Image: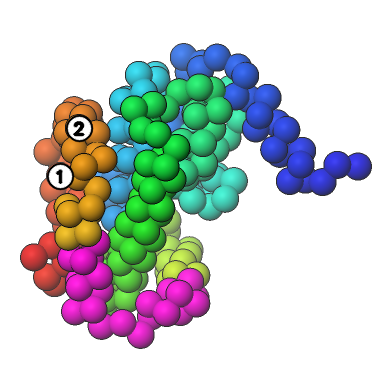
Amino acid sequence: MPSVLLTDSISFELGALEPWPSDVKLYQPYEVEQILLQDQANSLAVQVFLRMCGLEFQVEMRSNAEHMSPSGKLPFIKCGAFVVADLDPIVSFIANKGINLTDHLDAAQKADMRAYMSLANNILGNAELYISWCDENVLNEVTCPRYGSVYSWPLNTLLTWRKQKQVTKKLTALGWITKTLDEVNYSKKWIFTFADTVLKNYFCRFMKMSIIAVMPLVSASEIISISLMIDARSWMR
């Protein structure tokens, strides 16, 4: 029998041969009362990418979106018979259909871009997790109320506790759990400076297009919600 990974890989490749359906769904938690900083950032990134590729989709909000995801990561899309979660796999899935935004880059530039984007995504992603789950003020005032808002007691407390343990375990393995807030802020500022000085030659036009693409997606209520989530005691200063 073929291995699970081989079977999944073959299915993934076959899915790339099919045209993009008109009924693609993007699943995420509820924006106003539930979604957290990292999931909101990832969801907006996927929505921007899909819009820039000219692909039709509809956003579906579910209280249990995290548990519906095949990998537990958000957001995820349902494209025909295929369910693909997280930004990088979604980008790869679409690229296999011959749709991408990097035709103007040569092979070396594409490799550099992947390395830079991975570095930025890892640092900012870990920083978002740290701010949301390790800063006591943000944890108690924002993260816990939002994460458990769609569940009744005691399920809201149990699921929030379990999620915090998962995040803490990940940050411990990555060496982030012992960082101070100042060190996290320094990492964030460093990656922004790095992006400004190194990546602008590659992505100046791309970033302008991204801003234009994301504007229609963000309502006033979403901006307020996002602002509350990232009020992390000097996080955005």
Q: The N terminus appears in which quarter of the rendering?
A: top right
Task: Using residue 107 as the reference point, say whether residue 127 is left or right of it.
Answer: left
The residue under the point 59% across, 46% down is 70
How many numbered marks appear? 2
Task: Using residue 235 as the reference point, say whether residue 127 is left or right of it.
Answer: right
Return the mark for residue 237. Answer: none
Location of residue 119 (image quadrant):
bottom left
Span of residues in magenta: 169-191
Q: Is residue 153 visible?
A: no
Within 10 angstroms of label 1, few (less than 14), some, or many (20 or more) residues?
Answer: few
Residue at the left extreme?
237
Residue 213 colored in magenta in the image: no
Q: The C terminus appears in which quarter of the rendering?
A: bottom left
Prevailing SS of the magenta stretch: helix
Q: Nearer the viewer, residue 205 or 235?
A: 205
Q: Nearer the viewer, residue 34 or 102?
A: 102
| Residue identified by numbered label 2 | 205
The residue under the point 19% across, 79% down is 182
Q: Secondary structure at mark 1?
A: helix
What amino acid does circle 2 point to? Arg
Q: Is residue 113 above or below residue 16?
A: below
Q: Is residue 173 visible?
A: yes
| Image location (x, y in percent) of residue 234 | 11, 70
| Image location (x, y in percent) of residue 169 | 49, 76
Within 10 angstroms of label 2, few (less than 14), some, or many (20 or more) residues?
Answer: few
Of the residues under marks 1 and 2, which one precedes in the sequence?
Answer: 2
Task: Using residue 90 as the reference point, say whether residue 136 is left or right of it.
Answer: left
Location of residue 28 (image quadrant):
top left
| Residue identified by numbered label 1 | 223
| Image location (x, y in percent) of residue 200 | 19, 45
The residue under the point 66% across, 29% down is 13
The residue under the point 38% across, 77% down is 176
